[in-house]
Image (cartoon, coloured by chain):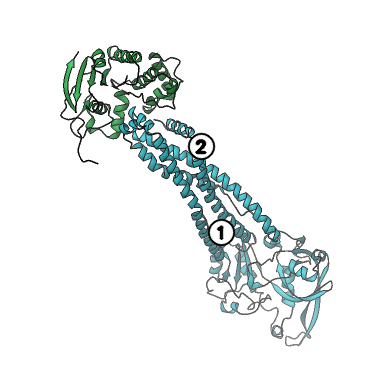
Amino acid sequence: MTFYDTLSLALRNLRQSRLRTALTTLGVAIGIASLSGMMSLGVGLQEQVVGRLTQSGVFDSITVTSGGGFAALLGAPGGGRGGRGGQGRGGRQGEARSNTPLDDAAITRIEALPHVNHAYPNVRVSMSMKVADYSGGVTALGVPDSARGIGAFETITHGVFFPDAQTEAAMLSLDMASQINEGDPASLVGQVITLSYAIASPTTDSPDAGRVVTRTERRFPIVGIVERDPDAGMASQGLAGLMIPIAHAQEISETMVTSAQSLLRASSDRPRTYTSVTVRVDGAQHTQDVQTQIKAMGFTTFSLHDALQGAKRAFLLLDILLAVIGSIALAVSSLGIVNTMVMSILERTREIGIMKAIGGSDRDVRGIFLVEAATIGLLGGVAGILLGWFVGRLINIGANMYIESQGGPAGNLFSLPWWLIGGALLFALVISLIAGSYPARRAARLDPIQALRHE
Amino acid sequence: MGASLVKALDGLTLTIAEGEFVALLGTSGSGKSTLLNLVGGLDQPTSGSLSVGGRNLASLTRDELSLHRRHTVGMIFQSFNLVPTMTAAENVSLSLMFAGVPRTERLTRATALLESMGLGGRQHHRPKELSGGEQQRVAVARALANQPPLLLADEPTGNLDSKTSTEIMNLIQTLNERDGKTIILVTHDAALAATYARRTVTMLDGHILSDTAA
């Protein structure tokens, strides 16, 4: 007996009890809908959270600090000079082995590593700022031209990114802009910001000469306002209210006087070193590799990659939990298949007897019933995926309406990737075959004489 | 449940040659149907041996037994045993389907068989749309579909009126005389046995009472 013949007999049997077939199929559909719906919720939430974080550029960036380990743990944020500033918290990856200076040469070497998009020093300077009627302290962050269009600068809420690396221009964070002009932060674009800080000039040419500290001012036109904090996730670095091209930030950092101690340092006799350098990798999957290589150069590295792995593990657990809950409905519907098949065998006992009397083998009979169960499973699987998708859309619309009313960004809470569709179909098929195996075996083992006497 | 063992057949020896038309005659419970079911491979003996065409049915596996039913014997029953949801042609092709005959050939052969049974034009009717005699002729066609040498009939006229009974018995006789099929007919009707069979084996309580050639 060919498979086609088995299939045609099975379909004919299913057609003969349409209502029962339809109800059983609906049962499977609800089971698969709840399973695929739950899993698609898990996948959707994961994409929402991990996707948003990945987009923020947190996971493809590595913060590199000079190898001094202990020294780097001390000090306050700010300033571009060696030996100061650094990180307070976070999962520091191992201890450095040597005191390699974190200077321009090191940045060049890091940028030469595979998968590194670019590396730039983190330069932060604290100054006084004056714009419109507002004046106060601000930390200015140096932003490289290569950050254009990525991470926090993917969308500029008002205005534009710096025209180029050299032009004097500034961007404000939306927080800072709102602080300056609560009613209409956008109106600040085009205004000029005045930054003032102290510089020291020697009184004579002698190296031991006294120094005069004077106040100097720089003027930067505001070109844009960004909503997102460029260093989201790097909590230890604090918020930067103001962003200026990195070349200007470095220049200010090198000339400004922050304390009496800094006056004692000679300004030009050693190469510039940096507290920390940010390295952008061309994909979160390469973060680990690059990190290992930078550590081998003798630096200390830090990234949120490990935190992402933790989040992924948590989501895996959530997925499993949701799948278990979803499976309960499927387990119930698989009992429905068993019930339907047993009923069908009772009704068709005599027919089974006839088939055996005219030469049907056990395998022929078992095949017919297994194919019937599998057909119910597959039909139920297809219907269930459609049902789950539809219900998911409905919940998504409702949830997004709520999220938006609360001021959050809308997104897809349910995600139905191809592997989930294929997996759900396969699962429906396997479950129905398991559910059908007992009734099919029972039908196959029927005694033909008894079956023929059955009314 | 009693523990008493009923021996449906006991100490019975019978040899039937190819081409014979044998009637198994007896009251109900005489063991004649049990014997027929054993020959037909629907049942297997608990002891003793039973050979059909040189094969000992007692030692066959379930699969081998289904092959025996498919190719060596054709069975006709008192209650016709047609699948009610299938047409006459589909009922006949069902046994061809188990034998793995391709679909188009199945239909051709089923139609030809039904025509030879005088059922031309009836092949798309379901059993309940056919008279008793017609249904039994469909059953005969089905029994012959895989061209078995042995035809087993269990009270084939039990549900038919006398005119139709005669038609069916004439048909069976023709199959014996013209086509050389070996026939075993189970009946409780001594007159029927005497009219059509060339040898009558009378049974009682699982034993053979008499074995007479006509």
Q: Is residue A117 above or below residue A199?
A: above
Q: Residue A70 in the image: x percent, y percent?
A: 56, 79
Disc 1 versus disc 2: nearer the observer: 2
- Residue at 72% x, 59% y is A155
User: What colour do you see for chain B?
Assistant: green
SS of the residue at dot 2?
Answer: helix
User: Element type at marker 1?
Assistant: helix
State the image quarter where residue B114 is shown. Answer: top left
Tell me which chain the residue with mark 1 is part of: A
Q: Which amino acid does the dot numbered 1 rest on?
A: Gln
Left/right of residue A381 with respect to residue A174 in the rendered view: left
Point out residue A399 in the picture as x, y percentages from the top left corner. 65, 55
Residue B199 location, x and y as percent? 21, 16
Chain to which the residue tagged by mark 2 belongs: A
Mark 1, other Cα within 10 Å: few <14 / some 14–19 / many ≥20: few
Separation of marks 1 and 2 at Cα, in angstroms: 52 Å
**Quarter of the figure with residue A64:** bottom right
Q: Is residue A282 visible?
A: no
Please tell me which residue lies in front, A295 or B93: B93
Residue A165 image label: none
Query: Where does the image place residue A173, in percent across and percent down from the top left?
Result: 74, 67
Q: Which residue is mark 1?
A: A285
- Where does label 2 land, which residue? A19
Rendering quarter of residue A406: bottom right
